[in-house]
Amino acid sequence: MTEMATQDYSQIRTIPDMLERTVALFPDRPAYSESKGSPTDWRTVTWKEFKDEVDRWKKALVASGLIPGDHVAILLPNSINAAVADQAILGSAMVPVPLHSIDTPSSSAYIINNSEAKLLIVPKTLRWNAITNVEQNFPFLTKVVVVGDDVIENAEKSPVPVVTLKEWLEAGKDTPLPTEKTKPEDLAAIVYTSGTTGKPKGVMLTHENIVANTKDFEKAAQLDETDSFLSYLPFSHTFERICTYYDALLIGAHVWFARNVAKLAEDLQFIKPTVFNSVPRVYEQFYQKLQSKRVKKGNFSKALADHAVAIGWRRFCRQNGLAVPSSSSSWLDPILWPILEKRYAQPVRDFFGGRLKWGVSGGAALNFANGTFFCGLGLPIFQGYGLTETTPVVCVNIRGMNNPITCGLALEHVEARIGENSELQVRGPSVMKGYWKLPEETAAVFTEDGWFRTGDQAEISDAGGIRINGLIKEIIVTSSGEKISPNDLELAILGDPLFEQIMTVGEGKPYITALAVVNDEEFAKLAKQVGADPNNPSSYERRDIRMLALKRIRKAAATFPQYGVPRNVWLLKDPWTVDNGLLTVTLKLRRRMINQRFKDQIEKLYQTPQANY
């Protein structure tokens, strides 16, 4: 770790400052790597090579007639070109608009027009054609650049001129580099929210917002240029944008772009990253995969594995100043741990590549059972919390003070308080400038004295640890007036391997019920208990099977008030995904859409007999 590289960030005020400094310090170190198609064949560019490519793109931007302040939409998967595009736009004093690479064509069209983007960068002509199939009117767009095609077919049918990347760069090769410098108060991105309800809003983030949050996050993470990041969350996800992409840029670390989510486990094995930032859903899937392997080894091996987690968790609690669970056998922990660690903990760490030293869980709450499992077995996972509007990190756990129940302490320059209705409110240099073209909505999310309303209920401990209890707007109020926050309840239920996804419902109803997507293998076991065929679609609706599932829900939610525990459940086979419109691109439930899609099933849950307990 070099002292200059990890401590002297005082001269950095804009994102281009980060790149200039890193290139000056580490010109020949690896900057970015992307797969050539094979799991072991990767293309890598150094920081100097990356900067040279950024300058080529800057010239092309100017040759396209764009000027400082113009908006450029980027619809690319995480890749070297995506990073080049972002840095070229920012280095030209323009504003990137990152689009979700897996978003729907209609949503992409809306963001392109709403953001008033002058230029659009897409991976394939097919992607642009899909957008024009739902929208033909683009009043601000002047050109579309296609990165992955050498020839544009049927270009004359496009409502906007389309060129290949090669043509675009060639047209700008003799153009002088832009000379206008970005300022801290300039916009550095318009990032659109996930849109769990209604149209997405464009969050205006300045260079000051991003630099402040990146510096504060890095102070908490304590990483350096020798670290390697595995990146898979889209750059349109502010969590990934700051905690992986810009943090690595700040310190000069190496970023590997994962091939896709389905191949994450394989990429972890090959790349062996030291840093891996993820949403809880991926940690949950890894947890279930690891647990499934343990079950197959038999009851005795599973019992030993559970014992390893228990011992490891007690060790973790001692190391982080947490209350240690009581156990009559804890005096044996120092003797048994070296044996159990080698057999049960090390394979889990090896699953992540064996070198991981910093893994943040953000974007949603981490299931406590998952947190206990991974932290107990020595995997350094730190839960954090933030929003797009806060650029995004508000708080994060750190080494020696890691409590998976909370989201840690507020970052150095972030202030946090609890307001009316237990709402978490924050202020600081990383809080957004406002919503693009929405002054009334902007005013509504700030208090009279200038604090940003997060919309989340929270608690702050005497030590400053922030615990999030869930979105205020998602709180369920039953017809009897009981209030239930679904967040923790659903996380607890997801601790049972039967349930892949779950959503509790009950607004204005006499009691709580649930919709649950089940695991195929676990459902087959459940069906066999009553002699049912798990491959018959009607099995999912059988009352006897649903009551067995409900018993498991009740067990998983045993610590919750009885009025908040589901009294009926509808089982589903097909998962909720981004493609079917039931998850946001950051894998959060679109509750309103799920309620609409399954309104008939929900009604049946209140018409048929339910469990009474």
Image: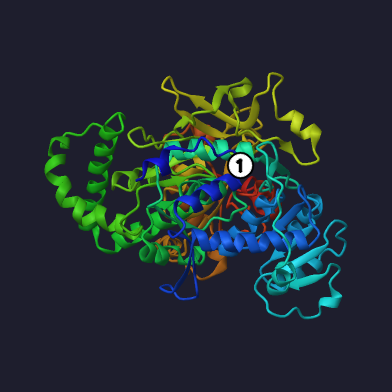
Whether residue 181 sits left or right of residue 289 in the image: it is right
What's the residue at 15%, 37% (across, down)?
329
Residue at the image position 44 percent from the left and 27 percent from the top? 465
Is disc 1 surrounded by few (<14), some (14 to 19) or many (20+) residues within 10 Å? Answer: many
Q: Amino acid at mark 1?
A: Thr
Whether residue 161 is visible: yes
* Image x and y of residue 511, in percent: 60, 37
User: Is 412 placed above or below 77 here?
Assistant: above
- Taking the spot 72% from the left edge, 50% from the top edge, the residue there is 94
Q: Nearer the viewer, residue 235 or 23?
A: 23
Residue 277 visible here: no
Image location (x, y in percent) of residue 584: 63, 52
As drawn, 296 above or below 210: below
- Quarter location, residue 314: top left
- Location of residue 86 (image quadrant): bottom right
Residue shown at 73% from the left, 60% from the top? 61
- 160 to the left or right of 60: right
- Which residue is more in the foreground, 237 or 24? 24
- In the rendered image, which residue does mark 1 sit on? 14
| Relative image position of residue 502 (x, y in whole percent) | 54, 50
Residue 241: x %, y % from top left? 57, 49
Per the image, label 1 sits on a secondary structure element best described as loop
Total number of numbered labels? 1
Work out whether 368 lies above or below 483: below
